[in-house]
Image (cartoon, grey):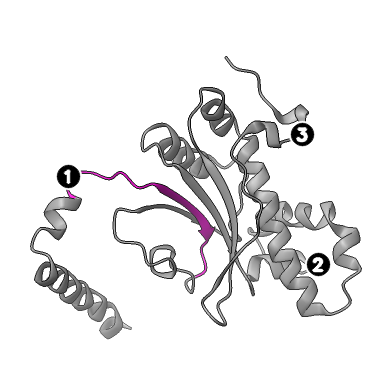
Amino acid sequence: MEAFYNQLLENNKKWAQDKIKNNPNFFSDLAKGQTPPVLWIGCADSRVPANEVIGAKAGEVFVHRNIANMVVHSDMSMLSVLDYAVNVLKVKHIIVCGHYGCGGVHTAMTNKKVGLIDNWIRHIKDSYRFHKEELDAIKDNKARFDRFVELNVVEQVHDLAKTSIIQEAWNRGQEVHIHGWVYAIEDGIIRDQKCTLKSNKELEEVYQLASA
């Protein structure tokens, strides 16, 4: 275990050396600040590295990750990242990216008791409840699981649009597009769920907050 830990530090040194070899100003340019055009809200799964799967460079993607890429309105960590991304960094695109085979989503399909995370999983179960009729009609277990992953992403896109942070940005005319994606670990390809939102007019009226 100690050898693995030490190898991580050695890997870092080699990575830094390689970056400087290819671009002597790589780190000095990054140190000047960040202006990423994208906020990525993704799953904490170690197999889905945000920058890598979309071929983005350092400084191009602001990232928040949690179990099952959830947008929970009481999650101060997510809200703080969102507020900074929208109001300070002025990102133009927010991507909610789930992935097939997500353990959090799979657990939400069962009655399994895991521990503290059960409180988080409950929010994912809400997504199932909203789409229970469609999901229960799918007899193949894997197909139902895959569809649940997709529908959960769509729900999180809409939940993101309902936040006061996004509502206020749209009301003042700021350009913010919210997208829902699902990444397939089996082939590395992202599936766009075609649920992009860019105005509160695309939400049900009850969620449209009035301008201050």
Q: Residue at x 36, y 62 (%)?
A: 56
Compared to residue 63, the image places residue 88 above or below, namely above
Measure how far apart labels 2 and 1 are at the Cα level: 49 Å
Side of 38 relative to 146 (left or right) = left
Q: Which residue is mark 1?
A: 32
Answer whether labels 2 and 3 touch (C-beta < 8 Å). no
Q: Position of residue 132 (x, y in %)?
A: 87, 59
Task: Verify whether residue 121 appears in magenta.
Answer: no
Please state which amino acid type lies under the numbered disc 2.
Asn
| x then y, percent, for residue 128 | 80, 58
The reply to whether the magenta stretch includes residue 34 is yes
Identified by mark 3, the residue type is: Glu
Judge whether residue 78 can be spotted in this image.
yes
Instruction: Give the number of the mark in front: 1 or 3.
Output: 3
Tell me which segment is drawn in magenta. 31-45
Query: Which image quarter: residue 84?
Result: top left
Mark 1 to mark 3 CA distance (whole Å)? 42 Å
Q: Which mark is residue 111?
A: 2
Residue 151 left/right relative to 167: right
Local SS, label 3: loop
Find disc 3 in the rendering and name its residue.
Answer: 204
Q: Whole-Å distance between the Cαs marked 2 and 3?
A: 32 Å
Depth check: 175 or 212 in front? 175
Q: Earlier in the sequence, mark 2 or mark 3?
A: 2
Residue visible at 65% across and 56% down in the picture: 194
- Identify the secondary structure beneath mark 1: loop
